[in-house]
Image (spheres, grey):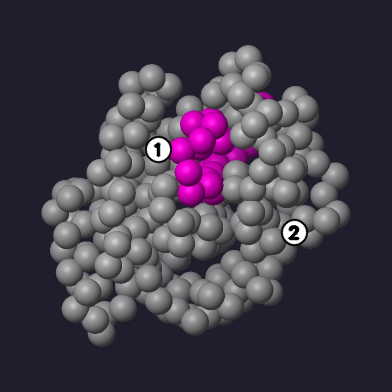
Amino acid sequence: MAKVIAIVNQKGGVGKTTTAVNLSACIGTLKKKVLLIDFDPQGNATSGTGIDKESLEASVYDVLINDYPMKDAIVETKTKNLWVCPADINLAGAEVELVSMENRTNLLKNALKSVKDSFDYIILDCPPSLGLLTLNAFSASDSLLVPIQCEYYALEGLSMLTKSVMTMKKDLNPALTFEGVLLTMYDSRTNLSNQVVEEVNKYFPDCVFKTVIPRNVRLSEAPGYGEPIISYDKYSKGARSYLKLAKEVVKNNEKKENKKA
C-alpha cells in the first residue's frame, strides 16, 4: 500500500512544486511506482511533468467535486514509473464548493482508497494556504514534508505551521507524522544560507533531511520544458540532489517498515 506524503508550507516560493515534481520523478527512477497529485490550483506540477492542462478529460477537481473515479483521472507521464492526477483552473473554485459538502475534509482520503494498492508512493503538491484543500491533504496523508528556503524569512510562519499541524493531527488525522524538513535554495557562498541551516536544525532537531537542495539554474529551467530535472539534465547539481533526497526518503521508509515487521 502506498505511503502518502504531502508537501506543505503556508509560505509560497519555498520550492514545494519543484520538490513535488522532482522528488516524485527521482523516486520513480528507483523502481518505485509514484502517483503525483497536483493539489494546487496553479497546476504547476501538472505542466511541470509535461501534461497539457487544456486537453484534460478530467482533473483532481472532478475527483473531489464530481465524485469522478481517481483511477480514471490519472495520466501517465513520459517519466518512467510516474503518474499524475492533474489540476487545472477549476480547482481554484473547489475551496468555495467544498464548504457546503458533507464530509468535506475527507474527500481526497476516500478517493485515494481505490488507487493506494497500485502505487508505492503518493505525493501531494499542496497550495500555500491552510484552506479546505490543504485540510483534505492533511487528512489523506501519512506524513508531511516541509520545504524551507535558505533565505532571510525562512523561519517566519514556521511556528504557526507547526501549531496548525498539531491542531490538524488532533482533529483530523492522529496518525500524521513529519516526513522531514527539506532545506531548499541553498547557496554555500553566503553566510545567510549557512545560518538558516543552523537555525532550522536547532528548531527541528532530528527532523531535517541530510540532503540540501542548492540553487541551480537547470532546476529553474526544467519546468519550462515540461520535464523533471532528472530527464532535463540528469548530470546537473539539482538532479543529483533530488536523486539523493529520493534515496534518503525511500531508505527512511524502508527502515520504518522493517521496524514494524
Place of residue 49 in the rendered image (x, y in percent of width and height, measured from the top left): 66, 61
Q: Give the distance between the C-alpha atoms of the residues marked 1 and 2, in whole angstroms.
A: 27 Å
| Image: 96 above or below 149 | above
Place of residue 110 in the rendered image (x, y in percent of width and height, measured from the top left): 61, 23
Task: Report the residue at 17% width, 50% height from top.
Answer: 203
Place of residue 239 in the rendered image (x, y in percent of width and height, measured from the top left): 48, 72
**Is residue 74 in sight in this rendering?**
no
Answer yes or no: do the residues labelled 1 and 2 have beta carbons within 8 Å? no
Decide which of 221, 153 is in the foreground and name it.
153
Give the SS element for disc 1: strand
Place of residue 14 in the rendered image (x, y in percent of width and height, measured from the top left): 42, 61
Q: Quadrant of residue 115?
A: top right
Task: Report the residue at 44% width, 65% height from top.
Answer: 242
Decide which of 93, 166 is in the foreground and name it.
93
Residue underneath mark 2: 51
Q: Earlier in the sequence, mark 1 or mark 2?
A: 2
Tell me if 152 is positioned left or right of 101 in this view. Answer: left
**Residue farthest toward the bottom in the current orientation of the protein:** 189
Kind of residue sitting beneath label 1: Ser
What is the quadrant of the C terminus in the image?
Answer: top left
The magenta stretch spans residue 57? no
Tell me the crowding category of disc 1: few under 14, some 14 to 19, or many 20 or more residues within 10 angstroms, Cα based: many
Task: Report the residue at 30% width, 41% height from top.
Answer: 160
Tell me if 150 is positioned left or right of 145 in this view. Answer: left
Q: Quadrant of residue 97?
A: top right
The magenta stretch spans residue 126? yes
| Image: 117 above or below 252 | above
Tell me if 67 is positioned left or right of 11 in this view. Answer: right
Identify the mark at residue 143; answer none if there is no mark. Answer: 1
Kind of residue sitting beneath label 2: Ile
The magenta segment: 111-136
